[in-house]
Structure formats: C-alpha cells, structure tokens
Amino acid sequence: MESPRPQTQRERWRRIIFDHDTAAGKAFDVALIVVILGSVFVMMLDSLPALSPGAHALLRRLEWGFTILFTVEYGARLWCAARPTQYARSFFGIVDLVATLPTYISLLFPSGRFLALVRVLRVMRVFRILKLTEYVEEAGVLSTALKASRHKITVFIFTVITLVAIMGSLMFLIEGPEAGFTSIPMAMYWAIVTLTTVGYGDIAPITVAGRLLASVLMVMGYGIIAVPTGIMTLEIQRASRPRGLPRAVSCAGCGRADHDADAEFCKQCGGRLPAREAS
C-alpha cells in the first residue's frame, strides 16, 4: 500500500485560507474578520474632525499597515488557489481586491481612502464560518420576488415620476422664486421630498393654494408608499410557496385572482377557472 503523498506548502496554505472546516481555517477566518473590523473602525475614527493631527497621522499609519496586510493576504490567495483566475473573478475575489485599492488610490486622491469601508463586505465570510449558508439561500426568495415584480415596479416608478413632474410644475407656477421654487427641477425636488413624507423643510409653500396642493401631495404620499410594499409582499409570498402547489389563476371573465387553491369557479362572477399548473 502506497503511503499518501505529503502535502506541499501551497496545499497546506490552501487548506488554511480556503478550507473553513479545519481548526486552522476557522482560526484564520476569525482573525481576518477581526482585522477587517479593526480596519473599518480605524477608518471611521479617521473621519472625525475633532481628533488632533497627531491622532490622524497615527490612524493613517495603521491604515497603511492594514492595507499592506490585506495586499499580502490577497497575493497569498492567488498563489495557493487551485484556480487563481476563477478566484479573482469570483464575488469574494473582487471584494478582496477592491478592499486593498482605496489606500493606494489615496496617494492621488486623498479622500479616496474612505472608500476602504467596502472592506466590511468581507465580513460576509462569517456565514461560511458559522455554517449559516442555509440562511443566505433565503436571499433567493427575495431575488425571485424582485425579478417577478420588476415590470410592476417599473410602471409604478414611471407613474411617480409623472406625478412629481406635474406637481412640481404646478407648485412652480403657484409659488415662484419668492418661496424658493426657483425652477421646475427645484420644485420637483420639493415634490419628491413631500411625496415620500420626508419633509426636510428647506423649501415650503407660503400661499394658500400652494399649501393646499402640498396637503394633497402629502396624503397621496401615504398611499403611494404602500404600493411597492404590497407588490413585493405578494411576490415574496408567491416565491415562498413550496414547489408543487398549484399556481394562482385569474378568472377569464372578471380578472379576479385571489381564489382558493382548490377552487374551480370564480367567487365573484361564478365562471369556471382555467386549469392550474404546478409551480
């Protein structure tokens, strides 16, 4: 019986870096996540203007240390990966590369270093370490619901844009530059803020007609916000339904669709329902 071939240095590092089931692999991933969170925390502190110049200089040196460490780690992943090109093109491979670039970019554009906060995406590896991949699969339900509702959402967005353009134009005509509505785009900005019930208050109508129009838009906003919520709720419910159950059908006569799974006739007009297909 032949003895097993001893592992090469590259294979050993591959097990440590990419294998999440071994003790060494788990320890490597946990240490990496701690370093990532430390880097993000340092970047957040560096954005505080109240810190002294000496503190900012120290934080910048720490950030360069993290960047060099991440660069070495990315190079090690490329070196020991079974298929380096496949890893480089994968989601985590792209995130790993992008996480190292902002600090180097800051040599040309100093503010670009704050893009390093993208490193927080690397913490997603915790799902693999803690065996939570089954929860990630639930994202497929949301993705299916988004795809199924994309046409309805598109129509809804165009409807909102049309409403904003009309209301903004009316408010521009009613209030004018004296109230801050200096142009139709500015009035459309006000309409969006009002329709979404955000209400910054930087622009506000001062005439009776303007306030009446604003009141109508505010009331409409509550109803409009509920539309995409209802669309997504329905599609998520459909996407979550176990496979094999019959699909919901619409009545050919009146168009009603909320029938029971075993219904043969429409509850509204009494017409026979089309045959159901299994999902």
Image (tube, helix red, strand yellow):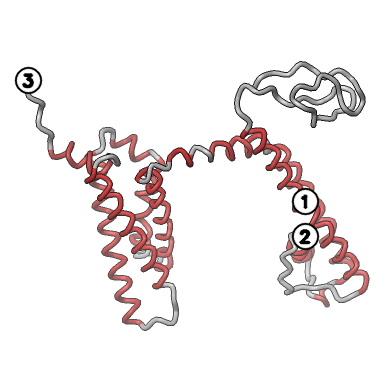
Q: Which residue is drawn at 75% across and 63% down?
A: 197
Residue type marked 1:
Val
Query: Mark 1: which secondary structure?
Result: helix
Point out the image quarter for the N terminus: top left
Q: Mark 2 points at which residue?
A: 195
- Near mark 3 (Cα within 10 A), the count class, few <14, some 14-19 or many ≥20, is few
- Decide: is 180 above or below 104: below
Q: Position of residue 189 (x, y in %)?
A: 74, 63
Distance of label 3 from label 1 (alpha carbons): 72 Å
Q: Name the residue under label 1.
A: 160
Residue 251 shown left or right of residue 6 in the figure:
right
Residue 24 shown left or right of residue 136 in the figure:
left
Report which quarter residue 81 is drawn in: top left
- Near mark 1 (Cα within 10 A), the count class, few <14, some 14-19 or many ≥20, is some
Question: Mark 2 or mark 3, which has the lower sequence index?
Answer: 3
Residue 176 shown left or right of residue 34 in the figure:
right
Report which quarter residue 64 is drawn in: bottom left
Distance of label 2 from label 3 (alpha carbons): 75 Å
